[in-house]
Every structure is written in C-alpha cells, then in structure tokens.
C-alpha cells in the first residue's frame, strides 16, 4: 500500500494543532490579546496626532450642521480631557479593527479544517469592510437625520444645550450599533459554514424577518421618528437578502469540499 508522505505530514500537523493543552490555549489567548492591544495603542497614537481634526472636523461637525445648530457644553472640570481620551481609544479600535479580527480568527484557526483556513484573510477583510460601512452609514445618514430631529422638536423657548459627553456617547454608540448590524452577512456566512443556518430557512421565514427588522430598527435608531427607522430598516432588508445569497454560496462550497470529487481536487 502506497502512502502519501505529504498527506501524512498534513494529518500530523492538524493533530498537533488540535491537541493543544488548556495551558497552551491560555498562552495563545494571552498573546492574541497582547497583539490586539498593541494594535489599539498604535491606532490610538495615530489618532492622538490628529485628535483636533477628528474632534472638530468629524465628530463635532454633525452638531454644527443641524438647523438650528446644537449647542454643546462641558459641565465637568476634566470633561474635555476625558472625551479626548475616549475618542482616542475609540479611534484606535477602529483603526486597528483588521488586526483585532485577524487575531480572533488566528486564535480559533486550530479548530478549523485545512480547507477553511484559507478563508481567514477574506473573512477579516470582509468583516472590516462591513463594520466600516455601517459606521459610515451611521455618520452620513442616521446621525444627521436624528440630530436634525432633536434640534427641531420641542418649544422654541427652550434652548437645546446638550452635555458634550452625552453627545459623544450618543454618536459613538450609534456608529458602533450600525457597524455591528452591518456584520449580518458575515455572521450568516459563519453560521452557514458550521451548518446552523441554511438559505432555505432564511427564505421560508423572510416575512418574519421583515417584522423583526422593523422592530430592531425601531430599537436601534437613535430618534423616535419614522424616517430614521426606515433609513436603518432599508439597508437591513438588503443585508438580509445578501445574507441569503452568501448562505447559498457557502452551502455550495461545503458540498464541493466534502464531495469525493472536491476532496480529490
């Protein structure tokens, strides 16, 4: 009987990777956390260099563009310093997001099949693009609509003087929520890869998904007006349909890779 040395070596490597002890897993996790933290620190340093532009030209700009402009005020002695530090950390996480996702996937890589490991780079890239697309959508669509609603609602006699820390908490949480929502296609791909989610299931319960999306949009949108809710619900509908296509593609790839013909390839 003739054996393939390369196949034996591959099996040996996979067996070694899957037989890591609990201490080795902890050590691997520790180094992944350290590398992720290092990326955040580097991203934070870069953000710190441009912090004035980030604050004045990006994060404070939506409040200045409302009609009438929202008035922000600081009511704490170290309020602005704390806000600057918060923005630096937040910007560092955003800038180092590809590295964070890469470290997460490298940590779970030993549990993946050899045929699945080749998708790690694509998954990291696609996840980063999806999250950043959600952040951009929130900044240019959700936030202007919500802030304009806040600026016009209520009595004209009452001044809308907003605490600046509440303002930053509002816009940062909105952008993070939108970024996570835009990860729906990536989550669908992962769940379909491990066999939990199937495209037939998503098509069957599409009407139920519409109701869930409308409820989720009502919860996640920062303002109670219907326009903001529909602005978020629309992309969610599109993302749901994209997720069905991704699930179908993932299922076909699984069938190809597990079939004898696909294995021989």
Image (cartoon, rainbow, N blue to C red):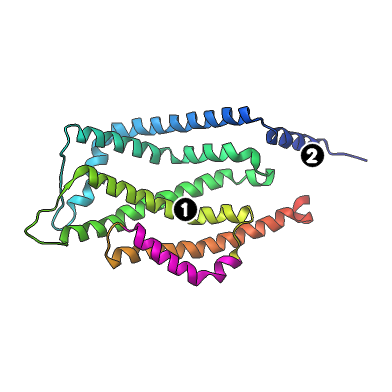
Of residue 107 and residue 224, the one placed in the foreground of this image is 224
Instruction: Determine if residue 232 is in view.
Output: no
Q: Which residue is the site of mark 1? A: 183
Instruction: Tell me which secondary structure the magenta stretch mostly adopts.
Output: helix
Question: What is the x, y in percent for residue 136?
Answer: 35, 52
SS assignment at label 2? helix
Q: Which mark is residue 7?
A: 2
Question: What is the x, y in percent for residue 33?
Answer: 49, 32
Residues under labels 1 and 2: Cα distance? 36 Å
Question: What is the x, y in percent for residue 203?
Answer: 56, 69
Name above or below for residue 9 compared with residue 247.
above
In reply to whether residue 235 is colored magenta, the answer given is no
Circle 1 or circle 2, nearest the eye:
1
Name above or below for residue 240 compared with residue 54.
below
Q: Which residues are magenta?
A: 200-221
Q: Are marks 1 and 2 in contact (CB under 8 Å)?
A: no
């Amino acid at each position: 009987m003739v054996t393939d040395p390369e196949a034996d070596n591959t099996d040996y490597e996979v067996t070694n990777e899957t037989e890591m002890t609990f201490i080795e897993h902890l050590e691997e996790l520790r180094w992944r956390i350290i590398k992720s933290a290092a990326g955040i620190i580097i991203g934070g340093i870069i953000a710190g260099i441009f912090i004035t532009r980030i604050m004045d030209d990006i994060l404070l700009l939506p409040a200045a563009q409302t009609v009438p402009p929202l008035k922000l005020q600081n009511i704490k002695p170290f309020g602005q310093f704390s806000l600057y530090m918060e923005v630096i950390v937040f910007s560092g996480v955003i800038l180092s997001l590809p590295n964070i996702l890469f470290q997460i996937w490298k940590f779970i890589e030993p549990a993946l099949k050899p045929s699945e490991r080749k998708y790690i780079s694509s998954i990291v890239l696609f996840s980063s693009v999806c999250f950043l697309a959600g952040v951009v959508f929130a900044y240019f669509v959700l936030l202007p609509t919500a802030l304009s609603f806040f600026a016009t609602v209520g009595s004209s006699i009452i001044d809308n003087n907003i605490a600046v820390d509440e303002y930053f908490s509002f816009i940062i949480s909105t952008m993070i929520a939108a970024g996570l929502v835009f990860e729906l296609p990536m989550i669908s791909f992962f769940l379909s890869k491990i066999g939990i989610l199937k495209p037939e299931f998503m098509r069957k319960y599409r009407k139920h998904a519409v109701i869930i999306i409308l409820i989720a949009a009502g919860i996640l949108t920062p303002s109670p007006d219907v326009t903001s809710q529909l602005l978020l619900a629309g992309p969610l509908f599109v993302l749901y349909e994209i997720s069905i296509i991704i699930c179908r593609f993932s299922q076909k790839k699984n069938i190809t890779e597990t079939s004898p013909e696909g294995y021989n390839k």
